[in-house]
Amino acid sequence: MMTTRLIETWLPIAELSEESVRERRSMTALPPIYYLHVWWARRPLVASRAAVLASLLPGDADQARFLRVLGIHGDPVASRKRINTARQRGERFEGEAYSYPRAFSYSPTESELDWVTEQMDRLGLEKPAVLDPTAGGGSIPFEAVRLRLPTFANDLNPVAVLVERLTIQAPLILGNTIVPEFRRLADCFLVLREERLKDFFPPEPESNAIPTNFIWARTITCPYCEGVIPLSPNWRLAPDGTGVRIKPNPATHHCEFEIVHSVKE
Ligand SMILES: C[S@@+](CC[C@H](N)C(=O)[O-])C[C@H]1O[C@@H](n2cnc3c(N)ncnc32)[C@H](O)[C@@H]1O
């Protein structure tokens, strides 16, 4: 009987890498679990599904089918190349760059799950359980459950455990019945939040300006000017070189901040 697993023989690293970046690229199209609660070390769902699945499929499993179950239904590497070429030429990319939706949005079908079961049978694995002892934001157990595998998640941090319970367990037990109650509570929360945070998010001076992001930073008090200095490992705001420049003012002993549009600046 075959014992070698797919993850030991082959893994489409370039495709997984590009799909993982794609999964995180747009802040408005992240997997829904990201919006439930922030977790600082949450792995991409497509990579998590690939790791779980490739650990349970035999080494000679059909590679095209594996990609299909992952939701990679085209060539993400070629798509990325097309986008990069268009960007280098300064052209706007017309139409959809990728030929299929983001992989994480794809849930395996019943027949695909049957195929996974058949393949695991070939390894003599009968309903293997997945254990993630340090599950954090829950990507691995989330994907294991989507593959209908018995799943155990654990974490030292009680916040992570709560995130895992609500991300994975609650929807399984309660289904859509919690949606109206969630919306009701969310509306109450928004009212409370606006009241308590309005002083920290001042209105924009220009009427047509819409703030999309605020950056929070720890601060130190400057030993020379006593000004409040935010700490940051980098001051980049966008990949095109846009960022924040610190402008020390020797006359007032204060630092000012301004937005610049190139790395050089
Ligand atoms: C890198 S994160 C996990 C990311 C997660 N596996 C994923 O794929 O999204 C590491 C997690 O391990 C947890 N952790 C660290 N030491 C632990 C321990 N001794 N027992 C259980 N959990 C622990 C941390 O609280 C943190 O949530």
Image (cartoon, rainbow, N blue to C red):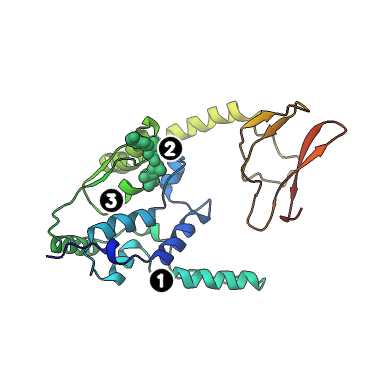
Q: Is mark 3 within 8 Å of ligand 1?
A: no
Give x and y (percent) for residue 154: 30, 37
Q: Secondary structure at mark 3?
A: helix
Q: Which residue is mark 3?
A: 144
User: In the image, is 102 to the left or to the right of 201?
Assistant: left
Q: Earlier in the sequence, mark 2 or mark 1?
A: 1
**Res 74 label:** 1
Q: Quadrant of residue 158?
A: top left
Q: CA distance from mark 2 to mark 1?
A: 36 Å
> Does the residue at mark 2 contact the one at mark 3 (Cβ under 8 Å)?
no
Q: Which amino acid, mark 1?
A: Gly
Residue at far right of view: 251
Q: Horizontal placement of 184 versus 243: left or right?
A: left
Badge 2 is on which residue? 183
Q: Is residue 211 visible?
A: yes
N-term mark: 1 or 3: 1
Q: Quadrant of ligand 1?
A: top left
Q: Is residue 7 left or right of residue 159?
A: left
Task: Give the structural element (helix, strand or loop) at label 1.
Answer: loop
Q: Nearer the viewer, mark 2 or mark 1?
A: 1
**Residue 164's x, y, as percent?**
34, 39
Crowding at dot 3, Cα within 10 Å, few <14 / some 14-19 / many 20+, comes out as many
| Quadrant holding the N terminus | bottom left
Label located before the other in sequence (2 or 3): 3
Q: Amino acid at mark 3?
A: Ala
In the foreground, 13 or 185: 13
150 relative to 178, above or below: below
Q: Amino acid at mark 2?
A: Arg
